[in-house]
Amino acid sequence: MVEDGAGRTPETTPAGKSVPARPTPVGRPAGASGEPSRLAAGPRQTWAALPWLVRSAVVWSACLVVVAAGLYLLGKTAALLAPLAVALAAALFLTALLDPVLLLLRRLRLPPAPAALLTVLLLLGILVGVGALVWNLTASQFEELRQELGQGLERARDFVTSTLPLTDEQLDRLVRQARQGLGAGAPDAVGGVRTAAETAGFVLFALVLLFFLLKDGRSMWQWTLRRMTGPNREVVAEAGRVGWRTLGAYSRGTMIIAAIDAVGIGLALVLLGVPLALPLALITFLGGFVPIIGATLAGAVAVLVALAARGPGVALLTLAAVVAVQQIEGNLLEPLVMKRQVRLHPAVILVAVTAGTLIAGIAGAFVAVPVTAVAYRVVDTVQRHRRAAAEDPSG
């Protein structure tokens, strides 16, 4: 066959006549088709043609969407199960706090069940005894405090009207509007009864769970480890030991620090002649279990009571005493009592307490920090094991 000058091969019909030949594309053999490969490589070529900044933005945006969806589902689940989670966390916190008492009773050759029951009864006895003592010592002071608060409010009213451009009528109107707003946001009686019943139920659940954790906690943990196989068993065992030690150190250290704060501020209130020093010291003790925020609120309550009862001079002295006790506790006692691996950054504590408060109120604020501390130590232990395994392939 003879090619024409343009590189085309004439085609011949069955009758022997020649017809014009179709041109062959340059760079592709005749009869070869590249359409499927072009379609297959199209998306990849389009993606590769995009600038790297656009590709990175797309990938990170997709990851953020997935993470946000997961966090949303986790938050919804946590909100639904918040009372149960708080009760479980409180039971674990109390178990770590009371574990030395249980071990002491076991050394006295008491069986597990009686030792656990006696430990729970000891906790209830302490709580009821402290509550009864505080009530008996301070019940007679509540009427005096009410009168002094009324006088303090009158002094505050006179100060506001004499300092700010407000008349008595305008101030009364603002007070009435505030009371109406508070009354509109107050829960109804039925909701209050239901909330009280649910709280009592979860408190009972936490106490029963505390008994079983004290009685069978170690055997349940060993049962869990026996179900693990391979290198994961060692990692889980080490993470569990570290987490439990962290929880125990945090619970006992927090209790010691809260007791020191309560004693120091209580003595200062007694020396300054502030009424209700014992219940204010108890509030300070309870506030110590919520780092930063709890101590701040407890100190503010003490200063307000001193202002209403004894005037601004004593209130300033009370503020100085509160600040001094908290500074000594934070800079001297806490590093000695708390182990280094238990301490968290203040920003992490604030975020944890805020999240716990939003999810489960005051109870969530109490358990947020120990849960965060334990989770941090467990994750750190797992990461260290993974790094060690990556550096030692033979292991």
Image (tube, grey):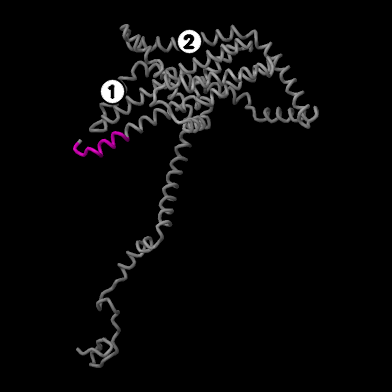
Left or right: 159 with respect to 106?
Answer: right
Q: Residues within 10 Å of mark 1 (few under 14, many from 20)?
A: few
Q: Can residue 272 be seen in this snapshot?
A: yes
Q: Residue 381 in the image: state x and y as whole percent.
A: 32, 31
Q: Can residue 93 be seen in this snapshot?
A: no
Q: Which mark is residue 222?
A: 1
The three-letter code of the residue at mark 2 reads Ile
Left or right: 239 with respect to 356?
Answer: left
Q: Cα distance, mark 1 to mark 2?
A: 31 Å
Instruction: Say whether residue 12 is magenta.
Output: no
Q: Residue 284 in the image: state x and y as whole percent.
A: 54, 18
Instruction: Between label 1 and label 2, give the one nearer the viewer.
Output: 2
Secondary structure state at the residue bearing disc 1: helix
Front-most of 333 and 169?
A: 333
| Chain-order first, disc 1 or disc 2 | 2
The three-letter code of the residue at mark 1 reads Gln
As drawn, 67 above or below 253? below
Name the residue rendered at 42%, 50% in the picture.
60
As drawn, 351 above or below 91? below
Name the residue rendered at 75%, 27% in the picture.
160
Q: Magenta residues: mostly which secondary structure?
A: helix
Front-most of 313 and 215?
A: 313
Q: Quadrant of residue 147?
A: top right
Secondary structure state at the residue bearing disc 2: helix
Q: Which residue is mark 2?
A: 126
Q: Residues within 10 Å of mark 2 (few under 14, many from 20)?
A: few
Q: Residue 376 in the image: state x and y as whole percent.
A: 39, 31
Asked whether the beta carbons under mark 1 and mark 2 sit within 8 Å of each other, the answer is no
Q: Which residues are magenta?
A: 383-394
Q: Residue 303 in the image: state x and y as whole percent.
A: 62, 19
